[in-house]
Image: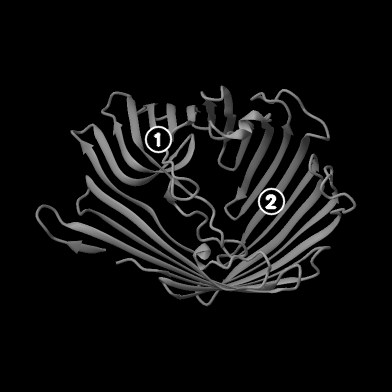
Amino acid sequence: MIFMSGVGSAVEVELWPETIFQLQQYRDVEQLKIDRTRFTQYLTLNLFESVEEPRHLFFSSLRVDLEMGRDNSPDASLLPSQYQHIALLYAYYEWRRIGDMVDLTIGRQVLNDELGIYPMDGVRAVFYRNWHVGVDIYSGLEIKGALSAGDRGLDLPNSDTHEPDGLIDDDHMTGVFGASVFLDGFQDTQAKVQFRQRYSGATDGQDLSLFIRQQLFDIWEIYTVDSFSLLLTRFEQVQLGTTVDLDWIAINLEHASWTPTFDGDSIFNLFAAYSEKSLSANVYLAPDDKTTINLGYSRQTQNGDGAFFDSWGNEGNASDFVDVSIGRSIGEIADVRASYDFNRGWGGDYHRMALGGGVFLWQRRVRLDADWTGTFFEKLTYNDLLTGITNEGLSWGVSGKSTFRVYKELSLALQGDVYSNRFIERQFALYMRLEVRLWR
């Protein structure tokens, strides 16, 4: 930490640079040589009052992402700008407890609520003062997070560009307004009703959401998360669930439904949108402090435009999923892990398996990991695009990783991967990742 004195209280400065450097070399399906080099630099700067409960705070994060190398494939971009991105992820000022009742946030911020993660440039105010009910209001301009063109094939320290809307695809800025009312001060009960509207010359979206979570007897929880599109007059999400947790065993039952949604002026609204619905049961076991076991089953269907699971479906639109995973610590320095997933129904029948482990060496300064993964395909249910081509057989991969903690803020990771399937006999990749984390 850095302490700065000025008029009034001292200011604490958090400066956090993070550097990630990666190398990769492999040959694609056509045996063309691909060399990839990627450099990503983050710089996080936070300022806040040096008091027990600071009221004035500033948070910011800048990212520079560069990719270099040679890609001999015919569809590779020749524009260096496609692989170079500078993004201000967030930069906002917080003034807390104004008049002991308002929290104010101004700047580029990332909302995370029942309607999803939403970055914006704007103002947000939260009102609450021992009234058991609070109000949250915000307004601003949308920030888009389009996928970077140069991300394929390398580890992803980031996946979006975080640029203001209107600068990527069109010239129309999207304004956003939202408000919510929520319960405040209840230990076992949470509830919130929220509204959000997006507008850019034509109405992009009007959404309403409901969130309720109720705790009973310290072991039983009931929850629901639902969202409804006022513009399209249909549910976008319906999630109902309950969990019983006895520490060494937890059981969860859940109904979930998602319907694809698009901007209000999208041409895709003219086509039928079918909900993906599921009923699932999961059991989490911890027989001791070194062992974890997860067991799960779900039935998923894709039929009709309703929001609730009202049909078990058939082979053409339904699937059954079974998954099992086990983790076990060995002493204080090693662990092993294994998993098995099975799917039968829509999309094909397949088995997925994984087996791996890791160990610390040299006073926990070195970590070695090895994993094997395999997928065995039995058949494809849909094959209109793959007529005459089957996907049956085994696809497998082996990954080995060594992580060296050079210093407490500096680590170096080396990773090698080998993959193979019936279309690619062997594919190799070698990664080197240098990560620097410094606090001052």
Quarter of the image where one finds residue 394: bottom right
Tell me the residue at 49%/28% (across/down): 207
Determine whether, in the image, residue 9 is placed left or right of residue 145. left
Within 10 Å of disc 1 (Cα), the crowding (few <14, some 14-19, many 20+) is many
Classify mark 1: helix, strand or loop: strand
Quarter of the image where one finds residue 86: bottom left
The answer to which of 104 and 265 lies nearer the viewer is 265
Determine whether, in the image, residue 122 is placed left or right of residue 146. left
Amino acid type for the residue under numbered disc 1: Val
Amino acid type for the residue under numbered disc 2: Ser
Residue 325 position (above or below residue 425):
above
**Looking at the picture, how far across and down is residue 198, in whole percent?**
44, 33
Quadrant location of the N terminus in the rendered image: bottom left
Determine whether, in the image, residue 59 is placed left or right of residue 238. left
* Residue 176: image tag: 1
Residue 357 position (above or below residue 186):
below
**Looking at the picture, how far across and down is residue 129, in whole percent?**
26, 28
**Looking at the picture, how far across and down is residue 77, in whole percent?**
59, 65
The answer to which of 281 and 177 lies nearer the viewer is 177
The answer to which of 29 and 253 lies nearer the viewer is 29
Closer to the chain start, of discs 2 and 1, is 1
Tell me the residue at 74%/41% (across/down): 321
| Inter-mark Cα distance, 2 to 1 | 42 Å
Residue under label 2: 325
Q: Is residue 260 visible?
A: no
Tell me the residue at 57%/64% (across/down): 155
Q: Is residue 227 visible?
A: yes
